[in-house]
Image: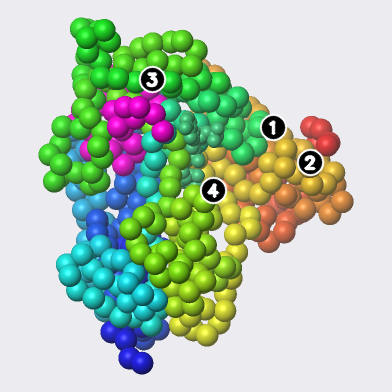
Amino acid sequence: MSFDYDLFVIGGGSGGVRAARVAAAEGAKVAIAEDSRMGGTCVIRGCVPKKLMVFASEYRETFKTAQSYGWDVTAGAFDWQKFQTHLHAELARLEQVYRNLLNSSDVEIFDARAQLKDAHTVTLSNGEEKTSKHILVATGGRPVRPDLTNAHLGIVSDDIFDLEELPKKMLIIGGGYIACEFACIMNGLGVEVTQYYRGAQILRGFDDEARGLVAEMMKESGVNLHLGTNIVDLAPAEGDHAPDPAGGARGGMGMPANERTVLSDAKSGPVWVKATNGDEAVYDAVLFATGRAPNTENLGLEAVGVEVGRRGEVIVDAYSQTGVPSVFAIGDVTNRVQLTPVAIREGMAFVETVFKGNPTAVDHELIPSAIFTQPEMGTIGLSEEEARDQEPIEIYCTSFKPMQTAFAGCSDRVLMKLIVSKATRVVLGCHIVAPGAGEMIQLAGVAIKMGATKEDFDRVCAVHPTMSEELVTMKSPVRTA
Ligand code: NDP
């Protein structure tokens, strides 16, 4: 049977684009469909714009500490519109880079929504129908709001980059990656940030000591963090819930809908909020950072026989293959590990398996990651709590004031922590809370992925004076478990 393509990719995010390009480089005839902007969550409404906002937000502190180093500078005002214009120009540039890469790889691009019709056919929203030997679902995920009356009054992370004005007062709901990162970003940009997290400590699942320090530092830097607290009610701030007349800017979605990256049904205007602790307040914006769901709706998956799990995720095996042999899925839509580099690796493994005849399972073990809070957290492997349930361990840990900000009189602390197996001496986990922790954990991750022992770390000479030198100079465990 002949098909229009060897591979049809649905979704032009990091994973889909990489798989399309690499398959095309192997000589496959490839097409890709994307109904929004090429680049997906990471490039258009996730990692990239978020990181640029992190950079923007860090300058306030930099200006402050610069004075201690003799510089006659003050932060002045932050111009959101100026930054936003530059940000969107950069995102447009990156989107074009993605398109150029696909074009130069001879991947045919359809700016359309695709739906599976059968195991080898997709229907496009422009009315076309295409057949393909293999179909790769790489449609990613989307932020979800909690099941709450008026939840549409809150914005989600997709909307942040298009805010017409920075809110003066903002409430962030959630305690995960996105909630904590944006709490720090907005706080750094001068927004008065309140954060509600329903659990006992933010960043559930990460090492207790590390997340405890992040929470402490966030509070110290001005984030009004309420633990064990959730939102119970929200409404437009009018009538009984009138906003404070001195309340300042409105955190609206004023940009025309057709200019926005992703359409949200968020309404503009101040929002009255009631919390589980009885607090009532009006905020210029409420951000729901309450998790993400796989984009599997209206894809035709069930009709074709592709199994979808409880959270809406495509069920795949270790080779990213669904129960329908010609249909594969990678990235956030499979809800395995929601990280861009993982989606890219899944895409590469898929091409290796299907187009290079070399069945390659994706390795989901020991994935380093960073949370771009201020300070950042970099982490790989087991937390102390996970490790001690697994085997006897030694914990090497130090927390101290880093030289650069201590000189400026700041009380910031950093943390370097290694979890070591008593039996094998292998480093089971590494947790860093410090400026630049993301950069550090990438490198520590190489050693840990190679199976380095504590003694391997000890054999490495320190780089002095740095924060990360502590990782190779911790002589005695602080405790065993
Ligand atoms: P997370 O799953 O990390 O966090 C969701 C948060 O919302 C949790 O604190 C959760 O609480 C809370 N929550 C869920 N439902 C409700 C509710 N109904 N009411 C109140 N709170 C609720 O999701 P994110 O959206 O922050 O991020 C999604 C994924 O994206 C991450 O897991 C990560 O893989 C990826 N990501 C990675 C980044 C990076 O690498 N730096 C940056 C951003 C995202 P509880 O803990 O109690 O469940």
Amino acid under label 1? Thr
The Cα–Cα distance between marks 1 and 3, rounded to whole angstroms, is 42 Å
Is ligand 1 closer than 8 angstroms to the Cβ of mark 3?
no
- Which residue is rendered at x = 59% and y = 44% of the image? 379
- Which residue is rendered at x = 35% and y = 64% of the image? 300
Is ligand 1 closer than 8 angstroms to the Cβ of mark 4?
yes
Does label 4 or label 1 sit earlier along the sequence? 4
User: Magenta residues, as a range?
Assistant: 147-172
Crowd rating for badge 4 (residues with CA inside 10 Å; few <14, some 14–19, many 20+): some
Q: Quadrant of residue 402?
A: top right
The answer to whether the residue labelled 2 contacts the one labelled 1, judged by CB atoms less than 8 Å apart, is no
- Which residue is rendered at x = 34% and y = 36% of the image? 156
Amino acid under label 3? Asp
Please name the residue that numbered disc 2 is placed on: 388
Please name the residue that numbered disc 3 is placed on: 233
Amino acid under label 2? Arg
Please name the residue that numbered disc 1 is placed on: 398
As drawn, which residue projects farthest toward the right? 423
Please name the residue that numbered disc 4 is placed on: 369
Any part of residue 308 in sight? yes
The answer to whether the residue labelled 4 contacts the one labelled 2, judged by CB atoms less than 8 Å apart, is no
The answer to whether the residue labelled 4 contacts the one labelled 1, judged by CB atoms less than 8 Å apart, is no
Does label 4 or label 3 sit earlier along the sequence? 3
Query: Left or right of 66: which side holds 392?
Result: right
Residue mark closest to the camera, 2 vs 3: 3
